[in-house]
Amino acid sequence: MAEEKIRAKLERLRNLSDQELVDELRKQRERLFQLRRRNVTRQLDNVSSIPETKRDIARILTLQTERAIAGGGE
């Protein structure tokens, strides 16, 4: 079940344009900042959302790198 959720998330990211990926990366970094801030002030209930968001950022960066390599080889 969790693996299907990850695949769906990755598929959604793959269908985004380059600019949309940049926007999504900015949004996820802002979310991570907010989560960390809420964690420090003890307002965050689900602390597992922090590593999940970090993984999402890593997925986006990986997709951007893949596209840069694919685009540079042409």
Image (spheres, rainbow, N blue to C red):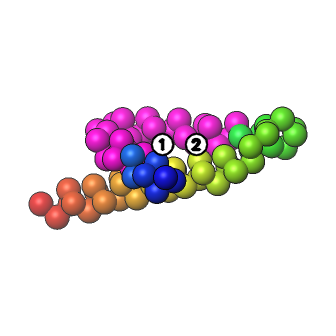
For image coordinates 27% across by 55% down, the residue present is: 67
For image coordinates 62% across by 37% down, the residue present is: 31
**Region of the chain picked out in magenta, as a range:** 9-34
User: Quick one: 9 or 69, which is closer to the camera?
Assistant: 9
For image coordinates 31% across by 60% down, the residue present is: 66
Instruction: Judge whether residue 25 is colored magenta.
Output: yes
Measure the C-alpha gap from mark 2 to mark 1. Answer: 6 Å
User: Taking 19 as reference, is 3 left or right?
Assistant: right
From the top left corner, tell me how far across and down residue 26 is, in percent: 51, 38
User: Taking 55 as reference, is 21 left or right?
Assistant: left
Instruction: Judge whether residue 55 is colored magenta.
Output: no
For image coordinates 58% across by 42% down, the residue present is: 29
From the top left corner, tell me how far across and down residue 74 is, in percent: 12, 60
Q: Amino acid at mark 2?
A: Arg
Q: Compared to 51, does 25 lie above or below?
A: above
| Res 61 seen here | no
Q: Which residue is mark 2?
A: 29
User: Quick one: 12 or 8, which is closer to the camera?
Assistant: 8
User: Taking 65 as reference, is 38 left or right?
Assistant: right
Q: Is the residue marked by circle 2 packed among few (<14), some (14-19), or many (20+) residues within 10 Å? A: some
Q: Which residue is mark 1?
A: 25
Per the image, label 2 sits on a secondary structure element best described as helix
Q: Amino acid at mark 1?
A: Leu
